[in-house]
Amino acid sequence: MKNMTKREYCFTGGNCPVCRSDDVDYIENTTNFLEQGRVCITCKAVWEEHYKISHYKLITDKDSSFHSNLQEYQRKEIYE
Ligand SMILES: [Zn+2]
């Protein structure tokens, strides 16, 4: 079986690019948040996933501080 193309890999959302299994895991100890080590439980293949920043969402506005907005944001995440 041929290895997956980039497009196929993105379409599956992270199945093993070698055997297509979805029984895959993350490898800890990655220091770059735009890369993540992955390992296939089925065939033991190891690879890296590389991420691109697609956009940002501003959660503060110019009249308030970062910390009060962050607390507000976290309260909403927890209680709503
Ligand atoms: Zn595999």
Image (cartoon, helix red, strand yellow):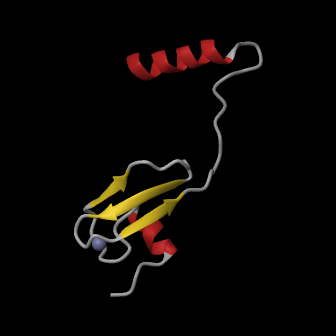
Q: As displayed, is residue 18 above or below residue 27?
A: below
Q: Report the residue that reaches farthest toward the bottom.
A: 1
- Left or right relative to 23: residue 74: right
- Left or right relative to 12: residue 53: right
Residue 79 visible to the viewer: yes
In which of the image's four quarters is ligand 1 placed? bottom left
In the image shown, does 67 or 30 lie closer to the viewer? 30
Tell me what residue is drawn at x 35 percent, y 77 percent. Answer: 18
Quarter of the image for the N terminus: give it: bottom left
* Quadrant assignment, res 42: bottom left
Q: As displayed, is residue 26 above or below residue 66?
A: below
Tell me what residue is drawn at x 67 percent, y 22 percent. Answer: 60
Quarter of the image for the C terminus: give it: top left
Across and down, in percent, residue 6 comes to: 50, 73
Tell me what residue is drawn at x 39 percent, y 66 percent. Answer: 12
Across and down, in percent, residue 50 comes to: 53, 60
- Left or right relative to 72: residue 4: left
Tell me what residue is drawn at x 35 percent, y 66 percent. Answer: 15
* Quadrant assignment, res 70: top right
Q: As displayed, is residue 40 above or below residue 77?
A: below
Residue 80 visible to the viewer: no
Q: As displayed, is residue 15 above or below residue 59?
A: below
